[in-house]
Amino acid sequence: MQKADIGLIGLAVMGQNLVLNMHDHGYKVAVYNRTTARVDEFLAGPAADTGIIGTHSLEELSVVLKKPRKVMLMVKAGEVVDAFIEQLLPHLEAGDIIIDGGNSLYTDSNRRTRELAAKGILFIGSGVSGGEEGARRGPSIMPGGNPAAWPQVQQIFQDIAAKVNGEPCCDWVGEEGAGHFVKMVHNGIEYGDMQLICEAYDFLRRGLGLSVPEIAAIFDEWNRGSLESYLMEISSEILTYQEADGTPLVDKILDAAGQKGTGKWTGINALELGVPLSLISEAVFARFISAMHEERQRAAAVLPGPDTIFAGEVQEYVQALHDALYAAKIVSYAQGYLLMRAAAGEYGWHLNYGGIARMWRGGCIIRSVFLDNISQAYSADPDLENLLLADFFAGALAKAQMGWRRVVAKCAELGLPAPALSSALAFYDGYRSHRLPANLLQAQRDYFGAHTYERVDRPRGEFFHTDWTGRGGKVASGTYNV
Ligand code: 2AM
């Protein structure tokens, strides 16, 4: 029997679709699933007449694989992945490759890369994005882990990935858990993009008083320019969708957002790494506020807002909102990249920054033309300190900033919450400030806690403490902390 190029464990929908996708691209695939009846059902159903090899034990799976063996896990994240690795090990030999394509925590992938390397097994932790449809027709694939494994799986991964302009939405991300980390950041950015579009909708609706079909038309138009993205496209389509009585379905949907926690993890990670990831974090908080639905009804009856009604040129504000959305999106991605840079520094990863933008251009929820510009910025300068400083984006922000400010100011005037648009602007203004009020903050810290401060007229690294009241000691806290 012809041996298989790759084995896949876990025949839930994602796993099945990846297998069929690999098969479409000419690969011989062998499959296994804990509940082996699923293997038989798969072979009798979606995989009928494909020549896909069904196996009923891990031993059987290992025997039918070409060497070095490549085994991809598409199983529930967490202990199940460790359990399968443990069970696979007796059937593998040095140089074999285990790929985890599930939604694993990147810290688990860090650990698995190291533990398996010590046993001679090459581990890849890969983000796979695009849901069931993506898995079947071409997902965005973000592999990281043991770099020695990449040349062995590059061809197959790039073959099955989504393509944009003929280029695969899959490239090597970096060491250890970098692939799963980047997938997590992708999910956080998705939260930010969605919240931005929702704020734009709210401004057009409650701020400018436009109708749902009018907003659908604006989104449709924006989807033909620099804001072109999958999320803009579906938002326009959602607003077009009407119930049988002709009312937009969106008006009937309860405004209490759910979440599975992936945005939250990005935010927690940013706090841990000390990165000002404000827009994505605000997007998570905005979902939390929306979920306080009953409490908000009570608050609405008690807490006053302004009586202001929009007065101004609607067209002018629609254009300003377009600019605000674009500028805030630039900030969101810049913040996401700051987080990836911080993680790279923390874990010693060499991240493929331009490649990451290219991987996100197709096959996943945040796909957009905008990612081309990011990819180009990193091609021009792979060591780019911050996306905002790339010529293209600095120029775009210069053009967009006045509209952005007008919209944020108008939201404040009208009492409309715009946490993502406005926190992005606060970040932009903070980031471009020569001087921030942290001088006073340092003084406060020194006043109550003798935490010391540096001076503008002295070199960095020299620390001073002042006895602010004449009653304190001369000893800085740093002195007795060490
Ligand atoms: P199953 O079909 O035997 O349930 C997604 O749930 C995939 O993860 C499925 O292939 C499922 O196998 C597998 N899975 C979930 N929990 C598992 C466990 N405790 N042990 C082995 N496989 C598991």
Image (cartoon, rainbow, N blue to C red):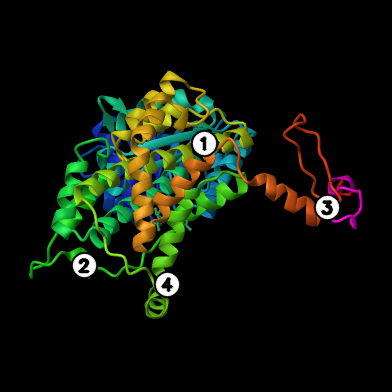
Mark 1 highlights which residue?
432
Between the C-alphas of marks 4 and 2, the distance is 19 Å
Between the C-alphas of marks 4 and 3, the distance is 44 Å
Position of the N terminus, as image quadrant, is top left
Magenta-tinted stretch: 469-479
- Which of the labelled discs sits on residue 292, or is there none? 4
Identity of the residue drawn at 53% across and 26% down:
147
Question: Looking at numbered disc 4 in the image, what kind of residue is underneath it?
Answer: Met
Identity of the residue drawn at 72% across and 47% down:
442
Crowd rating for badge 4 (residues with CA inside 10 Å; few <14, some 14–19, many 20+):
few
Between the C-alphas of marks 1 and 3, the distance is 31 Å
Viewer-proximal residue among 445 and 90: 445
Ligand 1 closer than 8 Å to label 3 CB: no
Mark 2 highlights which residue?
251
Mark 3 highlights which residue?
468
Of callouts 1 and 3, which one flags the residue occurring earlier in the amino acid sequence? 1
Question: Looking at numbered disc 1 in the image, what kind of residue is underneath it?
Answer: Arg
- Which of the labelled discs sits on residue 155, or is there none? none
Do the CB atoms of the residues marked 4 and 3 lie less than 8 Å apart?
no
Of callouts 4 and 3, which one flags the residue occurring earlier in the amino acid sequence? 4
Between the C-alphas of marks 1 and 4, the distance is 35 Å
